[in-house]
Image (cartoon, coloured by chain):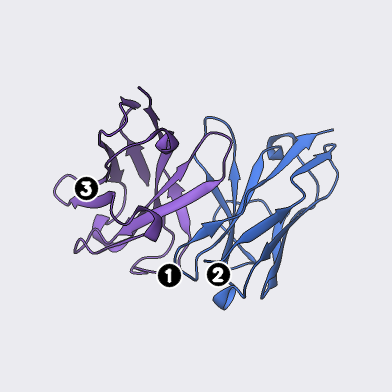
Amino acid sequence: EIVLTQSPGTLSLSPGERATLSCRASQTVSSRYLAWYQQKPGQALRLLIYAASGRATGIPDRFSGSGSGTDFTLTISRLEPEDFAIYYCQQYGNSPRTFGQGTKVEIK
Amino acid sequence: VHLVQSGAEMKRPGASVKVSCTASGYSFGTYAIHWVRQAPGRTLEWMGWINPGNGDTERSQKFWDRVTITRDTSATVVYMELRSLRSEDTAVYYCARDRDAYYFGSGSCMDVWGKGTTVTVSS
């Protein structure tokens, strides 16, 4: 199975700052089938990015995804208060679908 | 589009649990439904999916012999049954819908998620 390693584990930033989250795969993710999700306590998970760089419906343009092969990045250009959460990457090109261990973006 | 899950469950080791996921707001048979779980403090773990149109399923090898995913098309409900429960199965169980219609298998991520069902396994 494809193992996804996210870094850093925790990112401590202030509102307005730029956040860069990394997701590295143990083997090539086919057809850039890489998604990013946001998780907040008590809320349903939210799809942010699909196919490595496609922004999901209703997602603000401060969220962007990039990458291919084994290295992928989620960038939040200017952190808003509601962006402090845990972010997971997921590959969905191979079975079993796998998730990274998550990056927590916390307020500094 | 909504996915509404059944309520929290508490089970003894060795028992079974059946969690439901009621879908609404879209054509039930055209989008795969997945089950994903998250143990306390852990990441998300994909368990399997079902094609609600014909009942075809795929399960993760990890759960191959313990999980059954079924559906009731008349009620637009998907079920996930996990048997032979152990303490390590204590987790929040989520159902989630494929983003793309007719992508049964790989190639579509999940765009709508239920809020989760907490399953606690304890003696």
Q: Quadrant of residue B114?
A: top left
Callouts 1 and 2 close, C-beta under 8 Å = yes
Q: Is residue A70 left or right of residue B65?
A: right
Q: Tell me the crowding category of disc 3: few under 14, some 14 to 19, or many 20 or more residues within 10 angstroms, Cα based.
A: some
Residue for badge 1: B106
Q: Tell me the crowding category of disc 1: few under 14, some 14 to 19, or many 20 or more residues within 10 angstroms, Cα based.
A: some
The shade of chain B is: purple
In this rendering, which labeled residue sits more in front, label 3 or label 1? Answer: 1
Question: Can you say which quadrant of the picture contains the C terminus of chain A?
Answer: top right
Q: Residue at x 29, y 45 (%)?
A: B24
Q: Is residue B60 visible?
A: no
Identify the chain of the residue marked 1, using the numbered disc in the image. B
Identify the chain of the residue marked 3, using the numbered disc in the image. B
Quick one: SS at disc 2? Answer: loop
Residue for badge 2: A33
Cα distance in 3D space between marks 3 and 1: 23 Å
Q: Which mark is residue B76?
A: 3
Kind of residue at disc 1:
Ser
The shade of chain A is: blue
- Please say if A16 is above or below A90: above
Q: Earlier in the sequence, mark 3 or mark 1?
A: 3
Residue A26 placement (x, y as % from top left)? 64, 68
In this rendering, which labeled residue sits more in front, label 2 or label 3? Answer: 2
